[in-house]
Amino acid sequence: MFFLQPGSDSGTTAVVALIRGKQLIVANAGDSRCVVSEGGKAVDMSYDHKPEDEVELARIKNAGGKVTMDGRVNGGLNLSRAIGDHFYKRNKNLPPEEQMISALPDIKVLTINDDHDFMVIACDGIWNVMSSQEVVDFIQSKITQKDENGVLRPLSSIVEELLDQCLAPDTSGDGTGCDNMTCIIISFKPRNTHPPAESGKRKLEDVAAPGAPAEENGSDKKKAKLE
């Protein structure tokens, strides 16, 4: 009987975004992706680590591995950097960053300005279906929509619609749209997604003037008019 060992036979990609003042710092290991919308243009803030890339392929081969025709390391993983997956990190002659599968992240830095609208972080289940620009275009078309009360749509509902857009209608195809999907949208600009609160303050015309007869106020006033 074969048992999976956590950490040895499993792992995860990671993309982390830190906003410090006006700086956006993104670290990525794997094929998840962070994309920023700059005036509607998609700006990739991470690089997909795939085995067929020249830099990744050279490291994999130097560590004693190979990439099969379908783009998988030793016929297994279809990515070249990840946390965990220690099965691919057993070459005792090499440091961690030079193993077949490395957890060393690439880091990109961006100075946020008024042209930057939002960023989206998602795993490969999204990017295998839509390009960075297609995702930005999709979100851009939804992010300014308002309901009947003039309130902007919650970002969570846009995420749900994006996932539905990427989801395959069935499993009879090549697997596109059948992968796991995770997505976060972060707006750089303030958004009002709550209806205006009802004010509890009374208006001046709702309050009777001091000393005014009772029949000039409230239900007595209405009754007098009806008579």
Image (cartoon, grey):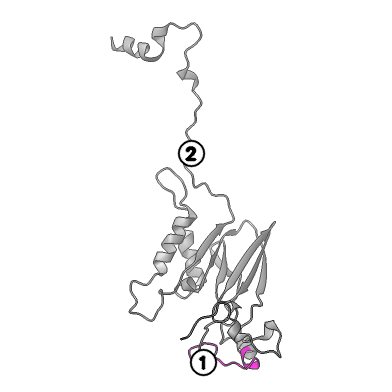
Secondary structure category for the residue under label 2: loop
x, y percent for residue 169: 33, 71
Q: Residues within 10 Å of mark 1 (few under 14, many from 20)?
A: some
Residue stretch in magenta: 60-73
Going by the numbered disc 2, the residue's amino acid type is: Pro
Using the image, tell me which numbered label, if any, was put on residue 5: none
x, y percent for residue 3: 49, 82
Q: Residue furthest left?
A: 227
Secondary structure category for the residue under label 1: loop
- Judging depth in this view, the residue of 11 and 211 nearest the camera is 11
Q: Quadrant of the C terminus?
A: top left
x, y percent for residue 74: 54, 90
On the rendered structure, is 76 left or right of 97? left
Tell me which residue sits at (47%, 76%) in the image: 128
Residue at numbered disc 1: 68
Q: CA distance from mark 1 to mark 2?
A: 58 Å
Image quadrant assignment for residue 120: bottom right
Q: Residues within 10 Å of mark 2 (few under 14, many from 20)?
A: few
Question: Is the magenta region chiefly helix, strand or loop?
Answer: loop
Tell me which residue sits at (48%, 39%) in the image: 196
Going by the numbered disc 1, the residue's amino acid type is: Thr
Residue at numbered disc 2: 196
Tell me which residue sits at (36%, 11%) in the image: 220
